[in-house]
């Protein structure tokens, strides 16, 4: 019945549907799938979204530039995902793993890679795909000894590097492509105090920063070369670190 209407009328009706309903509609038949892909629907949705969230790409200017070459539907999907993260909302909720009953202590999401740290001292890596969502990829186990307790994790999707910081300031860098059965490609150690507790780590393609307590300190390395660039002592309180490189020769630490 709907197909008896002019194309413009059908598109107007489809434009009133929710995102979830549009996805369902495109599964009805080939004609409706083509109509739901029409750029006018997604361009209008993106314009409306941008009017409500003017700073969607504020922290990711490169993605804004890359989006210009994408289809209107892809641009909208990318933008609504960022907006949902900013607002703390999601469109779908799914349980990815029960970690054998162990509590999750830390989670890091970078691009399409999700890393979890559980209380049983295991680190798990998941990869996101549009078709299947987050799927388990590999796991690292670090034993149950106090001096091997993992306190912080991070991941660098650009070059597929996983970073693990253990109690005592031992930090290990793993090549994700090689899997969990291979030794780390780099090992760094901030000091000799066995009970140093890492609170925060940050990594980019060249540098790595670690902050912790007992005693309180912040360490910075060129992790590729294994060279410690600096360390500073602070009060015995938790601190967060964040690395950004504004110029190739200028390193900024917060």
Image (cartoon, rainbow, N blue to C red):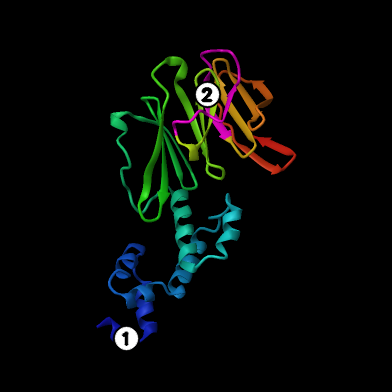
How many tags in the picture? 2
Query: How far across and how far down the image is residue 197, in percent?
Result: 51, 20
Q: Which mark is residue 198?
A: 2
Horizontal side of 218 relative to 166 (left or right) equals right
Q: Residue at x 36, y 25 (%)?
A: 120
User: Residue 42's image quarter?
Assistant: bottom left
Q: Is residue 204 above or below residue 103?
A: below
Q: CA distance from mark 2 to mark 1?
A: 64 Å
Identified at 51% across, 58% down, the residue is 53
Residue at mark 1? 5
* Quarter of the image with the C terminus in it: top right
Neighbours of disc 2 within 10 Å: few (<14), some (14-19), many (20+): many
Residue 229's spot in the image, x, y percent? 70, 26
Span shown in magenta: 180-202
Query: Does 14 lie within the magenta span?
Result: no
Closer to the chain start, of discs 2 and 1, is: 1
Q: Give the vertical position of 139 relative to 93 (above or below).
A: above
């Amino acid at each position: 019945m709907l197909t008896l209407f002019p194309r413009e009328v059908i598109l107007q009706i489809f434009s009133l549907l929710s995102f979830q309903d549009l996805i369902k509609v495109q599964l009805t038949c080939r004609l409706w799938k083509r109509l739901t892909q029409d750029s006018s629907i997604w361009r209008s949705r993106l314009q409306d979204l941008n009017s409500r969230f003017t700073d969607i790409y504020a922290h990711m200017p490169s993605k804004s530039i890359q989006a210009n070459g994408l289809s209107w539907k892809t641009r909208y999907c990318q933008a609504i995902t960022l907006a949902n993260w900013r607002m703390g909302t999601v469109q779908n909720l799914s349980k990815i793993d029960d970690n054998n009953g162990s509590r999750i202590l830390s989670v890091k999401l970078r691009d399409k890679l999700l890393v979890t740290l559980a209380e049983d001292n295991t680190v798990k890596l998941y990869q996101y795909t549009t078709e299947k969502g987050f799927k388990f990829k590999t796991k690292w186990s670090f034993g149950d000894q106090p001096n091997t307790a993992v306190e912080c994790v991070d991941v660098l999707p650009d070059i597929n590097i996983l970073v693990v910081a253990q109690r005592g300031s031992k930090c290990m860098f793993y090549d994700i492509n090689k899997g969990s059965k291979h030794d780390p490609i780099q090992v760094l150690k901030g000091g000799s105090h066995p009970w140093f507790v890492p609170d925060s780590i940050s990594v980019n393609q060249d540098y790595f920063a670690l902050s912790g307590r007992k005693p309180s300190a912040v360490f910075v390395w060129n992790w590729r070369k294994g060279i410690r660039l600096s360390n500073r002592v602070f009060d015995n309180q938790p601190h967060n670190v964040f690395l950004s490189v504004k110029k190739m020769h200028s390193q900024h630490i917060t």
